[in-house]
Amino acid sequence: MIRPARSEYEPYYGRYIDLVPEGNVVDLLAAQRDKILRLGRTLTEDQGNYRYAPGKWSLKEVLGHVMDAERVFVFRALAFSRNDPQEIPGMEQDDYARAANYGDRPLREILEEYNALRDSTVHFFRSLSDDMLTRTGIASGFRFSVRSILFIVAGHELHHFRIIREKYLN
């Protein structure tokens, strides 16, 4: 798949897109799911509740954030792929995290939800034609292509998986 041009997304998201290696990005999404689930099966509930510093999200909350962001990104991709002309508002991640209950839920349950969500995301992106991937729309005041959102979903998870490895599992 062709990488999105810088003109296909708001510059902030380049930090995620640049993390995505060459190759089939949808296959990468499936591989990420498998990696997270393998890791998750080795973690205890205490590890899921661990915060590496005061005020930081727990590991379960990080996973919840990844899921919430994926849902928002995929909704944007759905709307844009269907030529919806409406602008989509932004997402304030800290507000979402405060309003969620990921820290109160069992890690096993969060991983089951993550598996279902990622499975749905993989199926959705596999269903898109080349034309649909190049369609665009406005979210958070910026124009994005559907293709750029696919790369953002993959790169956002790569970013947070690196943080999990560096801050939560050492």
Image: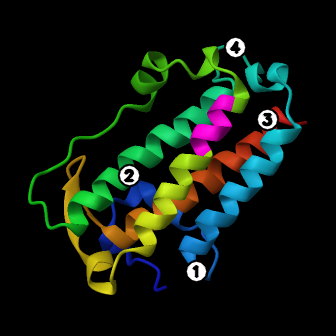
Question: What amino acid is labelled 3 in the image?
Answer: Lys
Helix, strand or loop at label 4? It is loop
Helix, strand or loop at label 3? It is helix
Q: What residue sits right under mark 2 in the picture?
A: 73
- Front of the two marks 3 and 1: 1
The answer to whether residue 11 is left or right of residue 63 is left
Q: Which mark is residue 54?
A: 4
Q: What residue sits right under mark 3 in the picture?
A: 167
Q: Earlier in the sequence, mark 4 or mark 2?
A: 4
Q: Earlier in the sequence, mark 3 or mark 4?
A: 4
Gap in angstroms between the C-alphas marked 3 and 2: 25 Å
- Front of the two marks 4 and 2: 2
Q: Earlier in the sequence, mark 1 or mark 2?
A: 1
Whether the magenta-drawn stretch holds residue 71 is answered as no
Q: Which mark is residue 24?
A: 1
Question: What amino acid is labelled 1 in the image?
Answer: Asn
22 relative to 159, above or below: below
